[in-house]
Image (cartoon, helix red, strand yellow):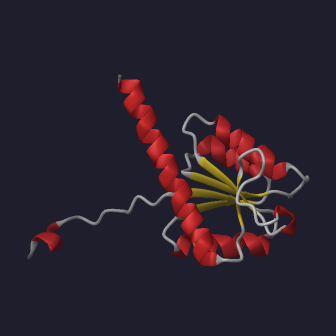
Amino acid sequence: MNKAQKTPHRHLDLARVLLVDDNLTSRLTLQTVLEAGGYHVDAAASAAEAIEKLEKHEYELVLTDLRMESPEAGLKVLAYARLMEYKPATALVTTYQDTRGRSKRPDGTVLIKPEDLPELLSRVADLISERATRRVERELVARR
């Protein structure tokens, strides 16, 4: 028996993503794409459900639709996520055409369009990487 066969199976530590969208089809499609991209995805159908999940688990990234049960529900989810001590990366997933090609809102919120799947996965990876960098930087500052 070689060394690889003796090593017990380990579960991969997948980056955890909270996906919030009230549209079942969109939510399931994005969840499938993100899981195929190697992420552990928790899904929520409303801002209230998302906030409940944010209280129970830590996420590397929170992706939310803007307009759900209210026109600003997604912004409420992002605001709440940004208050969490573990500081997840945050972004809006939007199909609305009023974004005029921008990748950020005037308030700095990242916008991701789900139509271009390779771009979606690239943006998700970038956001999670940036969050990890910020976390390491905070830890280094705290040690000084």
Horizontal side of residue 138 vs 120, given as left or right: left
- Rendering coords of residue 62 (x, y %): 64, 53
- Rendering coords of residue 109 (x, y %): 71, 49
Numbered marks: total:
0
* 15 up-or-down from 137: above or below: below
Residue drawn at (81%, 56%), measured in percent from left and top? 66
Q: Residue 11 falls in which quadrant of the image?
A: bottom left
- Rendering coords of residue 17 (x, y %): 58, 57
* Residue at the right extreme, as displayed: 70
Position of the C terminus by quadrant: top left
In the image shown, does 91 or 27 lie closer to the viewer? Answer: 91
* Residue at the left extreme, as displayed: 1
Residue drawn at (54%, 38%), measured in percent from left and top? 86
Horizontal side of residue 77 vs 68, given as left or right: left
Position of the N terminus by quadrant: bottom left
- Rendering coords of residue 96 (x, y %): 84, 67
Residue drawn at (86%, 58%), measured in percent from left and top? 67
* Residue at the top extreme, as displayed: 144
* 100 up-or-down from 131: above or below: below
Residue drawn at (76%, 66%), measured in percent from left and top? 101
